[in-house]
Image: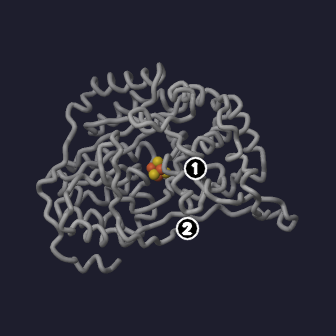
C-alpha cells in the first residue's frame, strides 16, 4: 500500500452536504469505514483512539492509501509517536471567552498522545497541516523552552498576575512529559513567583509534582481538575486509550487531596448514550476520593471532529451511532454542534436540561461545589533574575 494525493474536493469528509439527518450522516460514516482508501487498519492504529486520519482541513490535496501491488503481504507496523520541537517566542496565550473562568493559558504541548476519540483540541492540528485524526495523537509538538519564556513574561514590567490555566487545550501530563519535564519546569517558575495556576489533566503523572503543588496549594495558588468520563475500564480503553485508567484517576484524586491540593472532578465530556448514565457514579466515587468541586461538559464537536467521532462510533458502537447523534442534535438546536458562548458547554433542550439537573442534584447531595476556591494573586513577586537551571532548556 502507498499514499497518493488527490483533489481535496473529493475528500469524503469535506465534500459532505452541510446539513444531514443523523441517519444519513451515520450511513456516510459506515461507508467511509468500509473504504480501504479512508480507514486506517486496526494493526496500524493499535493503542490509538482515532480510527481514521482524514486530511487536515486547510490542505489543498487529500491523502489516500491505495494498493500499488508491491506489498500485499506486508502488515503495516503500529504508528509510532513522533515529537517535534517547537520554539515559540512567547508562551502565555490570552483569551476573552466569557464562558470560561480564565483569561490566559499555557500549552506545553500541541497534540496529545492520550488520544481521546472525542478531544475537542483535535481540529487545532490542522494549523500544522496535519490531520485531527491519528496525526493529532502521534505527532506531538513540544515546547521545551516554555519555562524560560514564562519566566521572561512574568518579569515584564506591565505583567498583571491572574490564574494561568494549563491543560485547557491539550494535556500537560501526557506521556512525553516524563521525558521532557516541561510542566515541572513551568511549575518551578510559577511557585518561585507565587503565581496562581489551575491544571486540567487525565494523567496520574501529576502526582510526580505533588511536592511543588502542595507548596503552592498551601498558599492558595494551585488547584487541579481531573477529568473522569467513565468508571468502566473497557470503555475508557476504547475512548481514551493512553490516558490513566478510571481507577488510577480516582487514586490520583485521592493522592492530591491527601496532600492538601484541592481537586475538581470534571465529568467531561458527557457523550449521549455512551457515558451519560454514569454521571452520578462518577461524582460519588470522586467525592469519596476527596474532590470538593465538580463540573461537566456536553460533548463538543467543532470542525471535522464530528466526523471523526462518527467514524469512532461506526467502528466501536455501530448500533448506537444514530442514537448518539439524535440526542446530540436535540441538545444542539438541530445541529451536531453549536459553538455559541453560553450554550456550547451544556447544550439546550430537554435532554441537556435533564443532564444539568442530574448533575446539580447529585453534586448538591454529595456536598460538592459548596464553595468555589479562588486562587490568590496578591502574593505574586516577579522573577528577579534567570535561575541558570532553566538555561538547560
Ligand atoms: S487528555 Fe485531554 S487533550 Fe489529551 S486527547 Fe484527551 S481530551 Fe484531548
Structural crowding at the residue carrying mark 1, measured as other residues with C-alpha within 10 Å and reported as few (<14), some (14–19) or many (≥20) = many
Q: Position of residue 263 (x, y in %)?
A: 28, 44
Q: Is 51 or 347 nearer to us in this picture?
A: 347
Q: Is residue 318 above or below residue 139?
A: above
Relative vertical location of residue 371 with respect to residue 217 in this rendering, above or below: above
Residue 20 percent across, percent down from the top left = 67, 32
The image shows residue 312, relative to residue 79, as above or below, that is: above
Q: Looking at the image, which residue sits at the far right?
A: 69
Residue 166 is drawn in which quadrant? bottom left
Callout 2 crowding tier (Cα within 10 Å): few <14, some 14–19, many ≥20: some
Q: Which quadrant holds the N terminus?
A: bottom right
In the image, taking residue 249 as reference, residue 264 lies left or right, namely left
* Label 1 – label 2 distance at C-alpha: 16 Å
Q: Is residue 357 left or right of residue 300?
A: left
Q: Residue at x 53, y 59 (%)?
A: 127
* Marker count (numbered): 2
| Mark 1 Cβ inside 8 Å of ligand 1 | yes
Residue displayed at 39% across by 58% down = 172
Residue under label 1, please give it.
Answer: 49
- Residue at point 83%, 66% (across, down): 71
Amino acid at each position: 500500500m502507498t499514499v497518493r494525493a488527490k483533489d481535496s474536493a473529493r475528500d469524503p469528509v469535506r465534500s459532505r452536504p452541510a446539513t444531514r439527518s443523523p441517519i444519513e450522516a451515520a450511513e456516510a460514516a459506515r461507508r467511509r469505514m468500509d473504504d480501504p482508501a479512508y480507514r486506517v487498519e486496526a494493526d496500524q492504529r493499535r493503542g490509538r483512539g482515532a480510527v481514521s486520519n482524514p486530511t487536515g482541513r486547510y490542505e489543498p490535496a487529500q491523502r489516500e492509501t491505495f494498493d500499488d501491488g508491491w506489498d500485499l503481504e506486508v502488515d503495516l507496523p503500529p504508528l509510532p509517536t513522533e515529537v517535534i520541537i517547537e520554539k515559540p517566542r512567547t508562551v502565555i496565550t490570552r483569551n476573552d471567552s466569557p464562558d470560561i473562568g480564565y483569561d490566559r493559558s499555557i500549552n506545553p504541548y500541541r497534540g496529545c498522545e492520550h488520544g481521546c476519540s472525542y478531544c475537542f483540541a483535535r481540529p487545532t492540528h490542522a494549523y500544522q497541516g496535519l490531520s485531527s485524526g491519528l496525526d493529532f495523537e502521534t505527532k506531538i509538538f513540544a515546547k521545551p523552552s516554555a519555562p524560560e519564556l514564562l519566566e521572561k513574561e512574568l518579569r515584564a514590567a506591565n505583567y498583571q498576575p491572574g490564574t494561568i490555566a494549563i491543560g485547557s487545550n491539550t494535556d500537560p501530563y501526557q506521556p512525553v512529559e516524563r521525558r521532557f519535564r516541561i510542566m515541572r519546569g513551568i511549575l518551578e517558575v510559577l511557585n518561585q513567583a507565587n503565581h496562581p495556576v489551575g491544571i486540567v489533566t487525565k494523567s496520574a503523572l501529576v502526582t510526580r509534582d505533588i511536592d511543588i503543588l502542595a507548596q503552592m496549594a498551601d498558599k492558595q495558588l494551585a488547584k487541579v481538575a481531573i477529568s473522569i468520563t467513565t468508571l468502566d475500564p473497557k470503555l475508557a480503553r476504547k475512548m481514551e486509550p493512553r490516558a490513566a485508567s478510571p481507577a488510577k484517576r480516582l487514586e490520583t484524586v485521592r493522592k492530591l487531596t491527601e496532600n492538601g491540593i484541592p481537586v475538581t472532578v470534571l465529568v467531561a465530556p458527557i457523550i449521549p448514550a455512551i457515558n451519560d448514565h454514569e454521571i452520578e457514579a462518577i461524582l460519588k466515587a470522586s467525592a469519596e476520593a476527596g474532590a470538593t468541586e465538580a463540573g461537566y461538559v456536553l460533548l463538543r464537536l467543532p470542525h471535522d471532529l464530528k466526523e471523526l467521532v462518527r467514524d469512532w462510533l461506526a467502528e466501536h458502537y455501530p448500533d448506537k451511532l444514530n442514537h448518539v447523534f439524535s440526542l446530540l442534535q436535540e441538545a444542539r438546536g438541530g445541529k451536531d454542534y453549536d459553538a455559541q458562548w453560553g450554550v456550547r458547554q451544556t447544550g439546550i433542550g430537554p435532554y441537556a436540561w435533564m443532564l444539568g439537573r442530574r448533575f446539580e442534584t447529585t453534586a448538591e447531595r454529595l456536598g460538592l461545589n459548596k464553595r468555589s476556591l479562588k486562587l490568590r494573586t496578591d502574593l505574586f513577586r516577579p522573577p528577579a533574575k534567570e535561575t541558570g537551571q532553566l538555561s538547560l532548556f
